[in-house]
Amino acid sequence: MLIQALFAAGKSTLSLHFNALECSLLILQEAVLILIALGANLPSRFGEPEETLKAAIKAIVAEGLEVLKVSSIWLTAPVPASKQPWYRNAVVSVQTNLNAGDLMRCLQKIEEDFGRERSVKNAPRALDLDILAFNHEVHTGHDCVVPHPRMHERAFVLMPLAEVAPTWRHPVLALSVQDLINEMPEGQEIEISEKRAA
């Protein structure tokens, strides 16, 4: 009876405490956020680019990363404009115990397994994996630059990113995803190729 009376008397306080805890957990989830971009415009041994991206997500999981959210697959024109086949692009959010450098090497290994050949800049590719953001860290090393230096200019990054992390803010530019979308260069052709699962 005493416990019931105390609970009834403190119901509002308990509710406030639980709401504060829920808000804290949401803030923590947004603070610990690793974003990876996927792109392909050539067939791989897994099939056409859309199938390649799906297989790449499975490969990311197989490497021990936890995939939290997956965007739609977007169909995008090459940037800069060229006669290459159009790309399929997506963004995933993940959690991992790897640091940024080790994660980059892990993604490069997956690219190689999928037949990625590094030739000239902006060449067509079977698979491209890039770290867009690694929590709120900023890396400027030769092998690992985070946030990705051109992500704020690319519709094929920002549109899928907005699906998986709509409240993310660029740690250098201090702009929200929507701010970046509003300010990105015009004329980039992009549409949803395969909508993400609800």
Image (cartoon, rainbow, N blue to C red):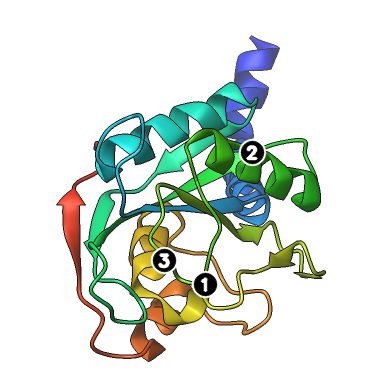
Secondary structure category for the residue under label 2: helix
Image side of residue 106 versus residue 155, left or right: right
Q: Secondary structure at mark 3?
A: helix
Looking at the image, which residue is at 62% across and 85% down? 173
**Mark 3 highlights which residue?**
157
48 up-or-down from 160: above or below? above
Amino acid marked by disc 1: Lys
Of the residues under marks 3 and 2, which one precedes in the sequence? 2
Residue 78 appears left or right of 146: left
Residue 138 to residue 103: above or below: below
Select label 1 or label 3 by which is in front.
Answer: 1
Alpha-carbon span between mark 1 and mark 2: 19 Å
Callout 2 environment at 10 Å: few (<14), some (14 to 19), or many (20+)? few
Amino acid beneath label 2: Lys
Dots 1, 2 in contact, CB < 8 A: no
Residue ID for mark 2: 109
In the rendered structure, are the residues bearing label 1 and label 3 in contact, judged by CB atoms less than 8 Å apart?
no
CA distance separating discs 3 and 2? 22 Å
Query: Which residue lies under the disc numbered 1?
Result: 121
Q: Nearer the viewer, residue 113 or 191?
A: 113
> Nearer the N terminus, badge 1 or badge 3?
1
Q: Position of residue 47 (x, y in %)?
A: 27, 33
Image disc number at residue 52 = none
Q: In percent of the image, x 29 and y 44: which residue is there? A: 49
Q: Residue furthest front?
A: 119
**96 on left or right of 81:** right
| Secondary structure of the residue carrying numbered label 1 | loop
Instruction: Work out how far the residue at label 1 is from the one at label 3, CA to CA, in angstroms.
Output: 18 Å
